[in-house]
Amino acid sequence: MSKRLGSHAIVIGGSIAGMFTARALSDHYDKVTILDRDEFPAEPIHRKGAPQGYQSHVLLKGGELVTEKFFPGFYDELTGLVPVIDSKDVAWYHYGVWRLRLKTGMKKYLMTRPFLEFHIRRRTQQIENIEFLQNVDVLHLLATEGNTKVTGVKVEHRGDSTAPSELLADLVVDCGGRGSSAPKFLEQLGYSRPEETTIKIDIGYSSRLYKMPEGLQMDWQYILIYPKPPHGTRIGIANTCEDGKIILSLAGCAGDYPPTDEEGFMEYLKSIPQKDLYDVIKQCEPASEIKSHRLPSSLRRHYESMTAFPENYLVLGDAVCSVNPVFGQGMSISTMSANALKESLDEYAAAGGRDFHAMRKNFYTRATDIINLAWNWAVAEDFRYPNVEGKKPPFTGLQNWYLGNLFELAASNKRIYFQVNMVLNLVAKPRTLLQPYILWQVVRKTLGFQDKGMRTMGNGHPIDA
């Protein structure tokens, strides 16, 4: 174990963000307790506290790298249990074109959100100094006189008639998700609530599991079909997963919600821009009910800009940033933010743990860089729809023009395809898309020069020529 920072740390929330945060803390605190309202299932099934878990989820490569760092051998343990694919197995229709299908060696592991969460929880439970306390509501924070330092939490056990109890801790990290009580807790201690940025996107999902029949012919393991905004609003996303199933999520932007009745659901699927997904799903057998989930807005709480803040308290994950889920960034933002916390704590411990506020600033600087990478991209894409409400970032129009050209070029240009793929997987900075070669290709496209000689698969999907 690295240099000790305290005897006890508390994590509010047992989500993926909470478990990765607990793993980061476990190197520096004698004991880490994860508090959650749910009673966690003993098998990989949905839980009430993760209503978004029914929709298709994929950890981006940035998130996968942190997962393997925090839980070595994690993906080796899943080999044979879930599909393992390469970029060539991903079919992505965007901006009116199919992107290239190139073999990059960048493995991706496909599974449902409950399956992933279950196995992360299994590995977290194997760490001796981490414990889970379930069926618990956190009522408020405990603090020193003057409220300058958080000293723990007051909790109430669900279904227990005994009086609320106090849990003391040297650090409390709030990973309570989008509905986190952190702003209220800060206000109770006499601090300001964080400034919030809200982008009204009005998106809705309907999702379902399907059983694949024997001999099913399909040329993808993961497929994403997006409209070309602002004219289209319907999205189809599906991936193979554990137990020989496919998870399908239909999404509608600008309030164009997909139905949850059988006939309406299939008609909606049939109406998305390309028929490839419909042609596969109509051959499959439904293996679950149709479940819906709606997100009215992307939400960001700017804890990084707060100057007055209690010592020994941090906020992380969806409690800080909850972004449009159609880009699949949420889980990866959380895992990468937990890694930023680990790196900041490592430096804090090496310096003797003497300046919490410097460590907090260090952490939020790192976490903000990660959040910006995802947020700026997603919000700019949201503003392609005229009815989206909120503060539009500077140069959004220019960014969208440039990225729109890159998305189209990714259908024929290998170098651009690869670099766009790296940025979307949160392993490369957006500035890498401004390399002279890439800029020149955008100029050529704007002037009307087009690459020729691209071969396609029988259904029109471009492949490596």
Image (spheres, helix red, strand yellow):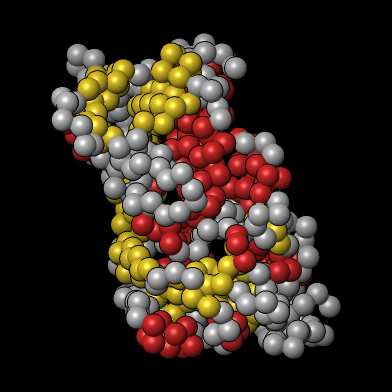
Q: Image point 15% across, 30% down: which residue?
A: 161
Q: Can you see residue 190? A: no
- Nearest the viewer among 272 and 386 is 272
Q: Is residue 170 above or below residue 22?
A: above
Front residue of 93 and 433: 93
Quarter of image, res 214:
bottom right
Q: Depth check: 115 or 306 in front?
A: 115
* Residue 293 image offset from top left, x and y in percent: 35, 65
- The image position of residue 391, as x and y in percent, is 32, 60
Q: Is residue 427 left or right of residue 9?
A: right
- The quarter holding residue 464 reads bottom right
Task: Specify the quadrant that holds the C terminus.
Answer: bottom right
Relative image position of residue 272 (x, y in whole percent): 49, 84
Q: Is residue 49 left or right of residue 90?
A: left
Q: What residue appears at the point 67 percent right and 74 percent down from the top-left corner?
A: 220
For image coordinates 48% across by 37% down, the residue present is 19
- Count all numbered tags in the image, as a single digit: 0
Q: Is residue 66 above or below residue 9?
A: below
Q: Position of residue 253 (x, y in %)?
A: 38, 74
Give the residue displayed 30% in from the left and 28% down from the top. Answer: 309
Q: Is residue 273 visible?
A: yes
Q: On the rendered image, what quadrant is the N terminus found in?
A: top right
Q: Is residue 90 above or below residue 306?
A: below
Foreground pick, 312 / 66: 66
